Amino acid sequence: MSRPAIRVYSRPGCHLCEQLLEELLPLLRGRADVEVLDIDARSEWALAYGTRIPVVELDGEFLCQFHLDAAAVTTALERRGIR
């Protein structure tokens, strides 16, 4: 069974994005993969997220933005049977 991927919508040079990833990676170690998506790579992402980054989601479910909500991420993983 493959691990789920947490998506982080970001952009290069975003200090909030870098900080969130530093906190997120240890939380997910061995539980989920992280897919970092540059919102400037696709116009629809740039329009959807603009300056509202970082945004974290799992399977299309919004989990948090700007700062890591570790409880929301953990709860979302647990609902999918990932401990």
Image: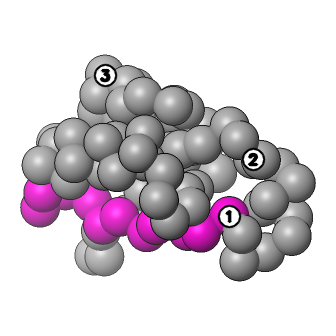
Q: Which residues are magenta?
A: 29-39
The amino acid beneath tag 2 is Tyr
**Residue 70, relative to residue 24: is it above or below?**
above
Residue 58 is situated, as x and y percent measured from the top left of the image, at 50, 50
Q: Earlier in the sequence, mark 1 or mark 3?
A: 1
Mark 2 neighbour density, 10 Å: few (under 14) some (14–19) many (20 or more): some
Q: Earlier in the sequence, mark 2 or mark 3?
A: 2
Query: Where 31 falls versus 76 (above or below)?
Result: below
- Which residue is label 3 attached to? 71
In the image, is 19 to the left or to the right of 64? left
| Disc 2 to disc 1: CB gap under 8 Å | yes
Crowding at mark 1 (Cα within 10 Å: few <14, some 14-19, many 20+): many
Quadrant location, the N terminus: bottom left
Q: What is the crowding at mark 3: few (fewer than 14 residues within 10 Å), some, or many (at least 20)?
A: few
Q: Is residue 50 magenta?
A: no
Q: Label 1: which residue?
A: 39
Left or right, 20 with respect to 35, comes to left
Q: Which residue is mark 2?
A: 49
Q: Position of residue 76 (x, y in %)?
A: 41, 36
Please, what is the three-letter code of the amino acid marked with disc 1?
Ile
Q: Position of residue 80 (x, y in %)?
A: 38, 45
Which amino acid type is marked by label 3? Ala
Residue 40, horizontal then vertical, whole percent: 72, 69
Up the image or down, 4 lies above or below 79; here it is below
Q: Residue at x 55, y 32 (%)?
A: 65
- SS category of the residue bearing label 2: helix
Q: Is residue 35 magenta?
A: yes
Q: Is residue 25 left or right of residue 26?
A: right
Question: Is residue 28 shown left or right of residue 30?
Answer: right
